[in-house]
Image (cartoon, rainbow, N blue to C red):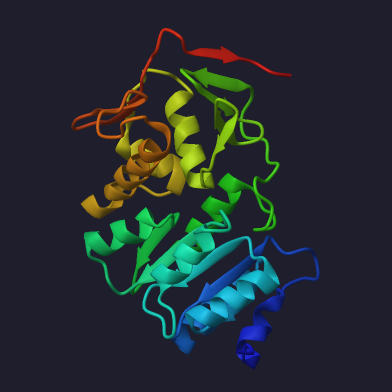
């Protein structure tokens, strides 16, 4: 399906002819939401393309290779969860869900599929803009097709047990085999292992990775879901974690293991 004229208007910033801050794909079946977000994000310096249903979203994703996707859950033809699942099968592009469904179960379901954030409707365009900026600043701007992106993120190689964490290339390997992590998952791992054994409060993790303080219990569930996802990929037995420990009532800590070592690289 060809994008309508309003959607194609989102391809460049009206403010200047300089290179945009990045390309954002907005997927929402409400024309008013698309129009408001195009105007807001263009003024912030982004190039914006829009889709009104799930099938069009997938087609535009492949055509435009956006740096971030803003994705409504309730979409015609293919819902947002299905779109997210398809995108995650081929790309680690950051995804922010929008939804009128603010139940914790819905939020957890979205994050479980690999979304980077979840914003309930009605939402403040200013807050969405801030979250987009935080995520793109964290992952580095670039093409969704580039996996991994060559973005420096710290120094050195961390070795914990049989894991090798390369913070320069943002890769994790076990016995030479790469473990696929999204940008948010890797950033969480790096935060927890930066100072082995230190208890990192959930509120601190939320602010460091997502850029906003917890305003309600559901916000902290974002952290719990991502820790669970990370354990599922790194721990031999996620139900009995040895690498990422829960400190009840506080947050999480990485296990200070005797064999852990940090080898600095130039």
Left or right of residue 23, residue 118 in this image: left
Quadrant for the N terminus in the image: bottom right
The residue that appears at 57% across and 74% down in the rendered structure is 58
The residue that appears at 30% across and 74% down in the rendered structure is 100
Q: Nearer the viewer, residue 138 or 18?
A: 138
Give the number of marks: 0
Q: For residue 204, what is the image quadrant?
A: top left
* Vertical comparison of 175 with 182: above or below: above
Question: Furthest residue to the top?
Answer: 258
**Is residue 249 in view?**
yes
The residue that appears at 49% across and 20% down in the rendered structure is 162
* Vertical comparison of 212 with 231: above or below: below
Q: Nearer the viewer, residue 182 or 155?
A: 182
* Vertical comparison of 20 with 202: above or below: below
Residue 266 x/y as whole percent: 74, 19
Question: Furthest residue to the left?
Answer: 249
Residue 153 x/y as whole percent: 62, 34
**Is residue 40 in view?**
no
The residue that appears at 30% across and 52% down in the rendered structure is 219
Q: Nearer the viewer, residue 62 or 30?
A: 62
Residue 119 x/y as whole percent: 37, 64
Question: Furthest residue to the bottom?
Answer: 5
Left or right of residue 25, residue 260 in this image: left
Residue 51 x/y as whole percent: 55, 81
* Vertical comparison of 153 with 91: above or below: above
């Amino acid at each position: 399906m060809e994008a309508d004229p309003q959607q194609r208007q989102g391809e460049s910033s009206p403010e200047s002819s300089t290179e945009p801050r990045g390309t954002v794909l907005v997927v929402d079946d409400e024309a008013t939401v698309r129009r408001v977000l195009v105007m807001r994000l263009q003024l912030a310096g982004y190039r914006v393309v829009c889709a009104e249903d799930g099938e069009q979203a997938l087609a535009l994703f492949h055509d435009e290779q956006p740096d971030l996707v803003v994705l409504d859950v309730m979409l015609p033809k293919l819902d947002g969860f299905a779109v997210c699942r398809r995108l995650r099968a081929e790309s680690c592009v950051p995804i922010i869900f929008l939804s009128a469904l603010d139940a914790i179960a819905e939020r957890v379901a979205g994050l479980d599929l690999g979304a980077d954030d979840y914003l309930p409707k009605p939402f403040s365009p200013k807050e969405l803009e801030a979250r987009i900026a935080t995520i793109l600043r964290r992952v580095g701007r670039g093409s969704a097709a580039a996996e991994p992106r060559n973005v420096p993120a710290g120094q050195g190689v961390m070795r914990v047990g049989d894991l090798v964490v390369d913070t320069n290339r943002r890769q994790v390997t076990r016995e030479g085999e790469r473990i696929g992590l999204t940008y948010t998952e890797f950033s969480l791992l790096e935060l927890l292992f930066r100072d082995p054994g230190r208890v990192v409060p959930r509120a601190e993790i939320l602010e460091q990775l997502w850029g906003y303080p917890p305003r309600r219990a559901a916000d902290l569930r974002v952290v719990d879901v991502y820790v669970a996802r990370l354990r599922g990929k790194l721990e031999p037995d996620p139900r009995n974690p040895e690498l990422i420990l829960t400190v009840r009532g506080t947050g999480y800590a990485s296990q200070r293991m005797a064999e852990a070592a940090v080898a600095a690289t130039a």
